[in-house]
Amino acid sequence: MIRKTRLFTPGPTPLLPAAQFAMAAADIHHRTPEFRALYTKVLRDLKTFVGTKNDVILLASSGTGAMEASVSNLTSPGDRVLVLTAGKFGERWVSLAKAFGCDVDVVSAPYGQTFDLEEVRKALKIETRAVYMQSTETSTAVRHNVQGVAEVIKQSGRDAVLVVDAITGLGTTHIDMDAWGVDVLIGGSQKSVMIPPGLSYLAVSDRAWDLMEISLNPRYYFDLRKERKNAAKGESAYTPAVALIAALGAALDYIAGQADGDLAAGRAKLVENAETCAAMTRAAVEALGLKLFAPGSPASAATAVLPPAGMDSGAFVKELKTRFAAVITNGQGEMKGQIFRIAHLGYFDYMDTIALIGALEQVAHSLKLPGFAFGKALIAAQNVFANRAPDEAARKELALAGAAPSR
Ligand SMILES: *Cc1c(COP(=O)(O)O)cnc(C)c1O
């Protein structure tokens, strides 16, 4: 049979065709009225997509560039910061903060789990300058409680800023940055917004802008104040990734188009879409007799699955790739061989999800999983889909976001 290559990876994710066309047509110079109109619109729409009144800054870098900027712009060497980590991306915060000379306190949770808020409360010190965390830890497919952490910081009376890597959280889970008191919220292009890698963006609170004025760390390319000044004029400080920005504009239009042009409502639908794909996948793998790696706090961005005892998770990755050209991911770093991960963020629909579950049944059959029978995983997923009232879930998310339902 022919095999169509399909990505089921949590970044890069499948590309939106309309965004690819927009990229191909983006033959424009960046110091022109044409570009300024595009850039201004994309920055305004990004604010709506993020769901904030704060300014959003767009950078030509992968997500880690925005993570670095939120360390270099907000801290000074010797500052005490707190990192909440339970996986590879949490560990990246630790390395970054140390690279810029911070004194790093760490609250950690075992891989596959999330933090105890009481430990977070105890770890906050008077001098804690900033708290860094993920919204979803992509390496373990765990969702962290951003609202809970924000509340702990607020109640502590400390004035630490909260910086959240929501690179796979945006578009997969409800986040209300302004109401919760998140100071920096970070996103990346190759995740929920369905375009290639190369752009990162951050929404920044007034408190965080003020903090930048007293930071002593050196910054040049990633000086967010400089970007903000230029953005106000519809420009970026250096040559922007014009084609990716055009793609992002098309993707945000597409997301708005899911809800009659209402981007906030479209984002709620995107979240609900990821939740449905994730719920179908969780039910399917459990019906296959496999265990979820993060049953307590699963992310909707991706699902992490444990292989049967004694089996390398790479067997699933390899079989899906060689037999069906479906690309899923193994565990990262020392998790390699121990879990496999299937993504749901961005441009995935019912058809993609049910097809992957069908292919997973074929793989389970050839790997001779104990108790395997064709149909079990598909039935479980079909039931999840049939029993979800998707519009209701989207309305709930909207109500949480304080936005008016579109119909
Ligand atoms: C993808 C991802 C990043 C960014 O990684 P880059 O390779 O720099 O784009 C950061 N954090 C999380 C949670 C991610 O999933």
Image: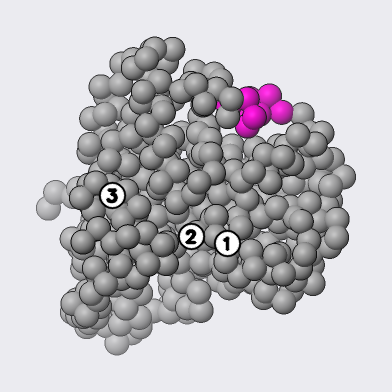
Identity, as a three-letter code, of the amino acid under mark 2: Ile
Task: Give me the disc on residue 262.
Answer: 3
Of circles 2 and 1, which is in front? 1
Q: Classify 6 as above or below 299.
A: above
**In the depicted view, which residue is nearer to us: 24 or 37?**
37
Identity, as a three-letter code, of the amino acid under mark 3: Asp
Q: Earlier in the sequence, mark 2 or mark 3?
A: 2
**Image quadrant where residue 270 sits:** bottom left
Q: Classify 200 as above or below 245.
A: below
Where's the C terminus, which quadrant? bottom left
Label 1 SS? helix
Determine which residue is flagged by label 1. 180
Determine which residue is flagged by label 2. 175
Q: Is residue 262 left or right of residue 379?
A: right
Bounds of the magenta span? 219-227
226 inside magenta stretch: yes
Q: Is residue 163 left or right of residue 168?
A: right
- Disc 2 crowd rating (10 Å Cα; few below 14, some 14-19, many 20+) is many
What is the x, y in percent for residue 384?
25, 78
What is the x, y in percent for residue 178?
55, 55
Label 3 SS? loop
What is the x, y in percent for residue 342?
37, 61
Q: Residue visible at 45% across and 49% down?
A: 50
Label 3 and label 1: CA atoms lie apart by 23 Å
136 inside magenta stretch: no
Identity, as a three-letter code, of the amino acid under mark 1: Trp
Of circles 2 and 3, which is in front? 3
Callout 2–callout 1 Cβ contact below 8 Å: yes
**In the depicted view, which residue is nearer to us: 219 or 344?**
219
